[in-house]
Image (spheres, rainbow, N blue to C red):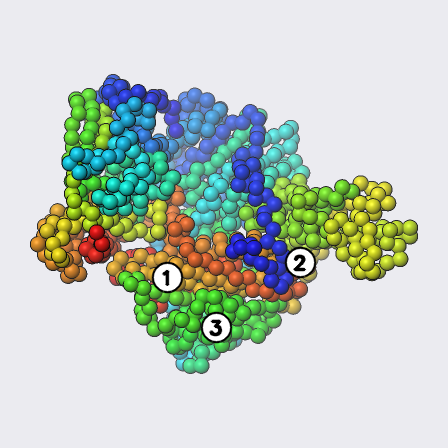
Amino acid sequence: MRPFVYEQPADVSTAVAIASRFTTNDDQPTRANAQFIAGGTNLADYMKLGVADPNRLLDLNKLKEQELRHIHVTNEGGIRFGALARMGEAADHAEVKRRYPVIADSLRLAASGQIRNMASLAGNVLQRTRCEYFRETSWACNKRVPGSGCAAMEGFNRQHAILGASDACIATYHGDFAQALIALDAVVHAEGSRGARKIVFAKLHRQPGDTPHIETDLAADEIITAIEVPAIPWARRSLYLKIRDRESYAFALASAAVALDLDGETVREARIALGGVATVPWRAGAAEQSLQGKKLDEASAEATAEAAFAQAQPRRHNAFKMELGKRTLVRALLETRDMKV
Amino acid sequence: MDAAAPKPKENMGEPLPRIDGRLKVTGQAHYPADLPTANIAYGALATSSIAKGKVTKLRLDDARAVPGLLDIVTYGDMDKLEKPKFGNSGATSIGPLHDRRIFHDGQIVALAVAETFEAAEEAAQLIRAEYEEEKPTATFDSPGTATIPAAGRSPLFKEDVKAGDFDAAYAAAAVKIDQRYSTPTQHHNPIELFSTTAYWQGEQLVVHEPSQNVTGWKVELARQLKIDPAKVRIVSPFIGGAFGSKGPMTPRTAIVAIAAKRLGRPVRCVTSRMQAFGTQTYRAETRHRIRIGAGKDGRITAFAHEGWEVTSRPDPYVVGGTSATGRMYDYGSVLTHVSLVQADRNTPGYMRSPPETPYVYALENAMDEMAVALGMDPIEFRRINEPKTEPIGKKPFSSRSLIQCYDQAAAAFGWAKRDPEVGAMRDGDWLVGMGCATAIYPTAVAPCAARVRLTVDGDVRLQCGSHEIGTGVRTVAGQMASERLGVSIDRISVEMGDSSLPPAPVSGGSISTASVCSAVLKACDAIRTKLYAAATAEGGPLAGSRNAEFELVDGKIMAKSGASAKVEDVLKAMQVGAIEEYAEFAPKGATPEALKKLYAGKPEFHGGDQDEDSVKYAFGAEFVEVHINRYTREIRVPRIVGAFAAGRIMNTRTARSQLMGGMIWGIGQALHEATEIDRRYARYVNRDLQDYLVPVNADIKDLQVILVPEVDHAVNPAGVKGLGELGNVGTAAAVASAVYHATGKRIRDLPIRIEQLLV
């Protein structure tokens, strides 16, 4: 681990100004000299492993803007999450649990209690892949060292993505919270040297394509300040189902975030996102469409799952995720249908 | 009394809390890397990123430029020293810095030493090796493996056991199975990382390192460094998990010792979690073919167990569990054969229940298949084949309470409520399965020395160079002294984990409680004899009650006649302040060389299948319930019950804790644990606890341990059978059996994962 400069900016504009001074417009946030840190549950780990190498850390925990730490119901009836609110706080928040069970579930089923108490919500959605070949610097990895190749492609790739992958990268996006956010059409608020802006959550992460080292739409001096979920009254009928090798503290092999607007047994609208199987938070739009106006039963759920995985590209060790992903979605749809709300 | 402190039954000691428990939970227990050491420098390892080839060049310039760097130990710096030796005290014969050849992934290429841990780490990461690379062989089925017979390659595995005419009996059998099973590479991953701290006081070398074998290491390290073993001291007062990984010394220890010598100051090297996968031992992956033939009545007439095990190129580490599986049931005829498969890997080693865990898994999974083939209840099938003598040498078992274990565990589990039909039991969307399997572990014992001092103030100091690896041996040794000397446990101090103490054998093979307690018993009895002689001497307080039976209770000698004398008064009458006895225990059947070998760090093991009069094993039966989701197929274990009999139980709390930990590990072996290897490069992939999964609290629900009373005077003077490695034997087979019962799918390759149940 190399020496680095550690600073605690007093407010958002100062943090942006410092970051702006030590980065350029072309820098990727994950590769810039100056990087932001909040809970540190991901970045500190990767710095120790030599995967991340910033020479200046801007600790956001002392930012004076209190709204960064708040979770509250908006005037429109949605929820606004301050970027520095911790996963644990959001998972336990009564209004989150009442209005968006899918969000509370996705947080409760992630990481461990200790990590949930440390990790910030914005940091959580920006967490980097846990691909074994990315984590260990002696392997070839296009995401870590652009152009060096991908050892995972023909290697041990049981954890890897079957949706959204490219010839350059098959690393999975492992987060859970992001699946709930993308399903609910969340919006991210960010501030940078070029001002404040809103980013539709679905545009925040980038598929790897030829440039897997470009992971998000953010500039290196941009800070997420809040995540806002719009009012969706029927999202009380929603859940997050996470299938993994052990019952806690493991990444999803497959997961599904589902919200349903039902008219009796007929689907008015469905929201579906898939975790553990894709390179980025994954909204299954075609699957949602295929379910609209249909009676939700085991057969229509299976047809929906087929649509969700129609484009999947399995590899040697992760081929089972096709079948597992479909069954996870079927189960999630039926369990959501049967929720008492 | 509560679940953690079971009420002692017949032949069981009190559930005393661990005497060092408070130190551990309050952070006052100093593990080797915590021991205060002044003026310390920090070392970090640089390791190879290839598995086979040669280091042609090592670029050190960038590393040398790191501020605070003090030294780099690498090729050339160990040339005048002896290479490591493979054996009980040495993990491998590969001397990584003696030889530029690379034998395995993650092999040490240099040690960077700096003023701070961070600088050492940075420098180590900047050391760049250039290689002449060769195509490595990863494991089974990889091109380039060499297969050799295992028998005779290890002192612990002399022969392939056999009995009768298997071929004829198998050919004639009415019902038979022929199946293959496999277990993966596993790494111990103790939470305490591997570390070495070394410093020299003139000619004297002191090493702080977590060790299960301080005496063996002292001798082996002195050999490598070409110095007198009396000049080496290994200190390891607490060990934060070992499981066999800290049994044999690795090459790192000598490298750190040399760094400390060159610098003239203490050097501490804590190996990273990732580096531990390549620099420490691991459980070899194994394959098995099992054939069982039986009559329609369920009586087994033929049993064959063939095993294949991966090892390194230079070292013939043998797992070899056929000695136990070949003696498990009344087979009629037995055929076994074990082969080693050499690949470009680091040398495997002992990991909790080394031979039994993989071999008994295969046997018990096969037994369950055979019961299905016979249409027979699996417990009944085992009952029918319960032996009177073991099938290989026709010797009796010194004691064998397997059926009692099955009966008690089955009753507690509610086996009678199980519907034997596959897939018949449901709980909503969850398929329910129930299975069971046998646990077995050989009962061995080794020579051991101990020193016990009883003072006029009623304090006891017990010294023994054994190792507290979390088993509670410090507590049970103290308990033995407490019982024999009539002194309460809070007056007893127990010192362990230091090669300057009286030598004890390696803490492996579940021998520690038996060996240490037998030595403590002998030392205490010598003190008792002296006390009693003085008390009953002419003019003594108990004069006249000579040759009578007596007890020591609460600081008093109580004669059967009712007369008593305070121990304090007897010592005063003797005009001494303390009685101290140094005792050397040698088990029955020990050779004349046995004690000499103990001091040389090469203790003889007796018991198990080695004795003339009988074979000695501890047994258990484990029952598991699994729930498997009908859609997504994840496997959960809501209930597990194990019943175990292991002779005298010294302390029901620590015994239960050992067995519980074993059962939980068994669940992990069944469902979670595997080191994944990238076969193209013969390199480990999931080298951390993020990807190397073990059970977490949420995976373990209702777990019950039943201690079955058993008395066995033949095993050792303490009457103790080791149980530290009993609990995780058989568990994985019980899970596999339950998975079959729930789904109809017989999974033969561990770990059992979702993908195997989706198809």
Q: Label 1: chain?
A: B
Q: Earlier in the sequence, mark 3 or mark 2?
A: 3
Q: Secondary structure at mark 3?
A: helix
As measured in the structure, the alpha-carbon distance from the residue carrying label 1 to the one carrying label 3 is 22 Å
Q: Share a chain, discs 1 and 3? A: yes
Left or right of B286, for residue B745: left
Q: Secondary structure at mark 1?
A: strand
Q: Which residue in the structure is indicated by mark 2?
A: B718
Callout 1 crowding tier (Cα within 10 Å): few <14, some 14–19, many ≥20:
many
Residue drawn at (23%, 29%) of the image: A225
Residue drawn at (53%, 30%) of the image: B267
Q: Quadrant of residue A297?
A: bottom left
The numbered mark at residue B382 is 3
Q: Share a chain, discs 2 and 1? A: yes
Q: Which residue in the structure is indicated by mark 1?
A: B626
Q: Share a chain, discs 3 and 2? A: yes
